[in-house]
Image (cartoon, grey):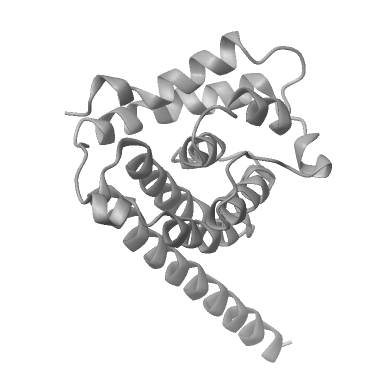
Amino acid sequence: MPSSDHNDICGQLLMRLRHEVKGRLTIGAIVENLADRAYALIILFLTLPNGVPGPTIPGMSTLTGIPVLIFALEAAAGRKIPRLPNFAAKRRLNRYVVMRHLERVRPYILNVETMMRPRFSWLVNRRPLLFGFCILFSLVLILPIPLGNLPAAWSIILLCLGLAVGDGLFVLFGIIAGCLATLWNILIVVVGVEAVRYVFAFL
Protein backbone atom coordinates (compact mmCIF):
# COMPACT_ATOMS: atom_id res chain seq x y z
CA MET A 1 0.00 0.00 0.00
CA PRO A 2 1.19 3.55 -0.61
CA SER A 3 2.02 5.69 2.32
CA SER A 4 -0.62 8.11 3.54
CA ASP A 5 1.53 11.03 2.41
CA HIS A 6 1.01 10.02 -1.19
CA ASN A 7 -2.46 8.46 -0.99
CA ASP A 8 -4.86 9.69 -3.69
CA ILE A 9 -2.47 12.07 -5.45
CA CYS A 10 -5.09 12.74 -8.12
CA GLY A 11 -7.63 13.66 -5.42
CA GLN A 12 -5.17 16.09 -3.85
CA LEU A 13 -4.59 17.78 -7.18
CA LEU A 14 -8.34 18.01 -7.79
CA MET A 15 -8.81 19.59 -4.36
CA ARG A 16 -6.23 22.25 -5.10
CA LEU A 17 -7.74 22.96 -8.50
CA ARG A 18 -11.24 23.23 -7.05
CA HIS A 19 -10.45 25.42 -4.04
CA GLU A 20 -7.18 27.24 -4.64
CA VAL A 21 -6.95 28.09 -8.35
CA LYS A 22 -9.25 31.10 -8.69
CA GLY A 23 -10.41 33.05 -11.71
CA ARG A 24 -9.53 31.99 -15.25
CA LEU A 25 -8.00 28.55 -15.46
CA THR A 26 -4.74 28.90 -17.34
CA ILE A 27 -1.73 26.61 -17.43
CA GLY A 28 0.25 29.38 -15.72
CA ALA A 29 -2.26 29.57 -12.84
CA ILE A 30 -2.04 25.83 -12.30
CA VAL A 31 1.76 25.88 -12.30
CA GLU A 32 1.83 28.84 -9.90
CA ASN A 33 -0.42 26.96 -7.49
CA LEU A 34 1.70 23.82 -7.70
CA ALA A 35 5.05 25.61 -7.60
CA ASP A 36 5.71 24.26 -4.10
CA ARG A 37 5.48 20.70 -5.41
CA ALA A 38 8.09 18.69 -7.27
CA TYR A 39 8.39 18.82 -11.04
CA ALA A 40 7.08 15.26 -11.16
CA LEU A 41 3.69 16.24 -9.73
CA ILE A 42 3.33 19.26 -12.01
CA ILE A 43 4.06 17.09 -15.06
CA LEU A 44 1.71 14.43 -13.69
CA PHE A 45 -1.11 16.96 -13.27
CA LEU A 46 -0.72 18.24 -16.82
CA THR A 47 -0.60 14.73 -18.27
CA LEU A 48 -3.55 13.22 -16.38
CA PRO A 49 -6.31 14.60 -18.66
CA ASN A 50 -4.72 12.69 -21.53
CA GLY A 51 -4.85 9.39 -19.64
CA VAL A 52 -8.60 8.91 -19.93
CA PRO A 53 -9.55 5.97 -22.18
CA GLY A 54 -12.10 6.78 -24.86
CA PRO A 55 -12.83 10.00 -26.77
CA THR A 56 -10.47 12.85 -25.99
CA ILE A 57 -10.59 16.62 -26.37
CA PRO A 58 -9.09 17.60 -29.74
CA GLY A 59 -5.77 19.34 -29.20
CA MET A 60 -5.58 18.54 -25.47
CA SER A 61 -2.45 16.42 -25.81
CA THR A 62 -0.64 19.17 -27.68
CA LEU A 63 -1.89 21.93 -25.37
CA THR A 64 -0.71 20.14 -22.24
CA GLY A 65 2.19 18.32 -23.87
CA ILE A 66 4.12 21.51 -24.66
CA PRO A 67 4.32 22.60 -20.96
CA VAL A 68 5.23 19.00 -20.03
CA LEU A 69 8.11 19.18 -22.50
CA ILE A 70 9.26 22.54 -21.10
CA PHE A 71 9.16 21.32 -17.50
CA ALA A 72 10.93 18.08 -18.38
CA LEU A 73 13.70 20.10 -20.04
CA GLU A 74 13.98 22.36 -16.97
CA ALA A 75 14.04 19.41 -14.55
CA ALA A 76 16.61 17.51 -16.62
CA ALA A 77 18.80 20.64 -16.60
CA GLY A 78 18.59 20.80 -12.79
CA ARG A 79 16.37 23.87 -12.48
CA LYS A 80 14.68 24.13 -9.06
CA ILE A 81 11.76 26.52 -9.67
CA PRO A 82 9.29 25.77 -12.50
CA ARG A 83 8.90 28.56 -15.05
CA LEU A 84 6.88 28.78 -18.25
CA PRO A 85 7.20 31.23 -21.15
CA ASN A 86 4.24 33.61 -21.43
CA PHE A 87 2.84 32.04 -24.59
CA ALA A 88 2.35 28.75 -22.74
CA ALA A 89 1.41 30.19 -19.33
CA LYS A 90 -1.48 32.23 -20.76
CA ARG A 91 -3.16 29.34 -22.56
CA ARG A 92 -6.66 28.93 -21.16
CA LEU A 93 -8.24 25.61 -20.21
CA ASN A 94 -11.88 24.73 -19.68
CA ARG A 95 -12.09 24.22 -15.89
CA TYR A 96 -15.12 21.93 -16.08
CA VAL A 97 -13.64 19.73 -18.81
CA VAL A 98 -10.26 19.40 -17.05
CA MET A 99 -11.90 18.50 -13.72
CA ARG A 100 -14.21 16.02 -15.41
CA HIS A 101 -11.27 14.27 -17.05
CA LEU A 102 -9.35 14.19 -13.77
CA GLU A 103 -12.36 12.63 -12.04
CA ARG A 104 -12.59 10.01 -14.80
CA VAL A 105 -8.92 9.05 -14.58
CA ARG A 106 -8.85 9.12 -10.75
CA PRO A 107 -10.03 5.49 -10.21
CA TYR A 108 -7.25 4.21 -12.48
CA ILE A 109 -4.66 6.23 -10.54
CA LEU A 110 -6.02 4.94 -7.22
CA ASN A 111 -5.70 1.36 -8.45
CA VAL A 112 -2.08 1.99 -9.40
CA GLU A 113 -1.29 3.74 -6.10
CA THR A 114 -2.42 0.73 -4.05
CA MET A 115 0.51 -1.22 -5.51
CA MET A 116 3.14 1.46 -4.95
CA ARG A 117 5.74 1.78 -2.20
CA PRO A 118 9.25 3.26 -1.90
CA ARG A 119 11.82 0.92 -3.53
CA PHE A 120 14.71 0.91 -6.02
CA SER A 121 15.94 4.27 -4.77
CA TRP A 122 19.05 3.93 -6.96
CA LEU A 123 16.78 4.47 -9.98
CA VAL A 124 14.54 7.13 -8.45
CA ASN A 125 17.57 9.26 -7.59
CA ARG A 126 18.73 9.48 -11.23
CA ARG A 127 16.33 12.34 -11.93
CA PRO A 128 18.13 14.09 -14.82
CA LEU A 129 18.13 10.81 -16.74
CA LEU A 130 14.49 10.09 -15.88
CA PHE A 131 13.33 13.54 -16.94
CA GLY A 132 15.29 12.95 -20.12
CA PHE A 133 12.92 10.07 -20.82
CA CYS A 134 10.04 12.46 -20.03
CA ILE A 135 11.35 14.77 -22.75
CA LEU A 136 11.17 11.97 -25.30
CA PHE A 137 7.73 10.78 -24.20
CA SER A 138 6.32 14.34 -24.13
CA LEU A 139 7.41 14.79 -27.75
CA VAL A 140 5.37 11.71 -28.59
CA LEU A 141 2.44 13.07 -26.55
CA ILE A 142 2.48 16.39 -28.42
CA LEU A 143 2.12 14.77 -31.82
CA PRO A 144 -1.54 14.59 -32.98
CA ILE A 145 -1.36 10.91 -33.88
CA PRO A 146 -4.63 8.91 -33.63
CA LEU A 147 -4.38 6.09 -31.05
CA GLY A 148 -0.91 7.30 -30.08
CA ASN A 149 -1.44 9.78 -27.25
CA LEU A 150 -2.96 7.48 -24.61
CA PRO A 151 0.05 5.10 -24.35
CA ALA A 152 2.44 8.07 -24.24
CA ALA A 153 0.37 9.76 -21.53
CA TRP A 154 0.32 6.67 -19.33
CA SER A 155 4.06 6.19 -19.66
CA ILE A 156 4.57 9.72 -18.27
CA ILE A 157 1.92 9.14 -15.58
CA LEU A 158 3.59 5.93 -14.36
CA LEU A 159 7.05 7.50 -14.43
CA CYS A 160 5.97 10.63 -12.52
CA LEU A 161 3.87 8.68 -10.00
CA GLY A 162 6.93 6.54 -9.35
CA LEU A 163 9.05 9.66 -8.81
CA ALA A 164 6.43 11.24 -6.53
CA VAL A 165 6.13 8.14 -4.33
CA GLY A 166 9.75 7.03 -4.67
CA ASP A 167 8.84 3.74 -6.35
CA GLY A 168 11.59 2.87 -8.80
CA LEU A 169 9.72 -0.18 -10.06
CA PHE A 170 6.92 1.99 -11.43
CA VAL A 171 9.49 4.42 -12.81
CA LEU A 172 10.88 1.44 -14.73
CA PHE A 173 7.37 0.47 -15.85
CA GLY A 174 6.92 4.03 -17.14
CA ILE A 175 10.18 3.93 -19.08
CA ILE A 176 9.32 0.57 -20.67
CA ALA A 177 5.78 1.74 -21.48
CA GLY A 178 7.16 4.96 -22.98
CA CYS A 179 9.62 3.13 -25.20
CA LEU A 180 6.83 0.85 -26.41
CA ALA A 181 4.55 3.87 -26.94
CA THR A 182 7.27 5.54 -29.00
CA LEU A 183 7.67 2.45 -31.18
CA TRP A 184 3.87 2.20 -31.50
CA ASN A 185 3.64 5.81 -32.72
CA ILE A 186 6.47 5.26 -35.20
CA LEU A 187 4.60 2.19 -36.49
CA ILE A 188 1.37 4.20 -36.88
CA VAL A 189 3.20 6.90 -38.83
CA VAL A 190 4.98 4.39 -41.09
CA VAL A 191 1.77 2.47 -41.79
CA GLY A 192 -0.10 5.73 -42.42
CA VAL A 193 2.51 6.99 -44.87
CA GLU A 194 2.58 3.68 -46.71
CA ALA A 195 -1.23 3.62 -46.86
CA VAL A 196 -1.30 7.12 -48.39
CA ARG A 197 1.37 6.15 -50.93
CA TYR A 198 -0.60 3.02 -51.80
CA VAL A 199 -3.79 5.04 -52.38
CA PHE A 200 -2.04 7.64 -54.52
CA ALA A 201 -0.40 4.91 -56.58
CA PHE A 202 -3.85 3.96 -57.89
CA LEU A 203 -5.05 7.51 -58.60
Q: In the picture shown, does residue 19 fall above or below 56?
A: above
Question: Residue at horizontal 32%, vertical 50%?
Answer: 124
Q: In the image, residue 200 lies at what x, y percent?
A: 71, 85
Residue 202 shows in this picture: no
Q: Quadrant of the N terminus?
A: top left
Residue drawn at x 61%, y 86% is 198
Q: Residue at x 37, y 40 (%)?
A: 161
Question: As rendered, which of 124 and 43 lies closer to the eye?
Answer: 124
Q: Position of residue 180 (x, y in %)?
A: 37, 66
Identify the residue at the far bottom of this view.
Answer: 201
Residue 21 visible: yes
In the rendered view of the protein, which quadrant contains the C terminus? bottom right
Which quadrant of the structure image shows residue 146?
bottom right
Q: Which of 131 and 88 is in front in this view?
A: 131
Q: Where is residue 152 in the image (x, y as percent from the top left)?
A: 47, 55
Question: Compared with residue 152, is residue 105 higher up or lower down, i.e. above or below?
Answer: above
Q: Which percent across, then down, holds residue 57? A: 63, 38
- In this image, 118 relative to 183: left or right? left
